[in-house]
Amino acid sequence: MLRTHVLRAGAAAAGAVTAILAFAGPAFAHVTVNPKEATQGGYTKVTFRVPNEKDNANTTKVEVNLPTSTPIASVSLKPLAGWTAQTETSKLATPIKTDDGEITEAITKITWTADANAAIKPGQFQEFDVSLGPLPEADQVVFKALQTYSDGDVVRWIDEPSNGAEPEHPAPVLKLAKKGAATPAAAPVAVANTADSSDGESANGTAIGFGVGGLVLGLAGLAAGLLAYRKASRAG
């Protein structure tokens, strides 16, 4: 009877581990922008972090769209070894006024394409740095991103949060604070092509570790109890 209970408990624990990993897995796959907040009218460097969420395909192309409704006059890219960057400009419905005159065109799309050896492999991520400014006088800038895989699959990270709920494929969002308001410091930029280590993901991973560790210890206790029971039965 005891052995039956132990086996059932073990099966339940294994199912719980699977559920924890299945629930937490998608949280690691989001395309994000760091820092998450900047100041209206200022300049900032943002980093788009792109993890590979597939086990059997590489990420070969990343496209980030800058909204025409909140255009940014100055956009410059940091070179990244193994990746070719291209930009597209669009005519602005409302020109941007600057001290040097009006700007009628702005960059609205950035596309990074990997060479054969630089693609983002399973279990890896890459970071793409962009300098932006002056930032618009708006509450936020939404960067809709497309992630292309070597198997032809395209994941569209374009959904905006609705009613406080996070969508399945959220777009990277940069919150903008008004001038004079305090903004949080940017998180350190991690080295590319290593395990993802953003703050939210690290916390998520730590929680998973504790949960799995607790289940393992519970199984070990059950196994020890079963061995003790067997020894006692043999002695009897």
Image (cartoon, rainbow, N blue to C red):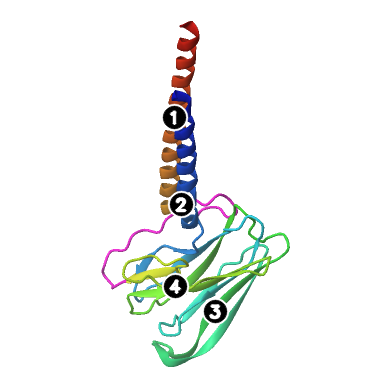
Tag 2: amino acid: Ala
| Residue at 35% across, 76% down | 41
Q: Please name the residue that numbered disc 4 is placed on.
A: 159
| Residue at disc 4, secondary structure | loop
Q: Please name the residue that numbered disc 3 is placed on.
A: 109
- Mark 2 and mark 3 lie on one chain; the one further toward the N terminus is 2
Q: Please name the residue that numbered disc 1 is placed on.
A: 5
- Mark 1 and mark 4 lie on one chain; the one further toward the N terminus is 1
Using the numbered discs, state the Cα–Cα distance from disc 1 to disc 3 in whole angstroms.
Answer: 59 Å
- 90 or 26: nearer the eye? 26
Q: Position of residue 125 (x, y in %)?
A: 57, 57
> Magenta segment, which residues?
177-198
Q: Which labelled disc corresponds to residue 24? A: 2
Tag 4: amino acid: Asp
Using the numbered discs, state the Cα–Cα distance from disc 2 to disc 1 in whole angstroms.
Answer: 29 Å
| Residue at 45% across, 68% down | 170
> Does the segment drawn in magenta span residue 189?
yes
| Residue at disc 3, secondary structure | strand
Tag 3: amino acid: Lys
Secondary structure mostly seen in magenta is: loop
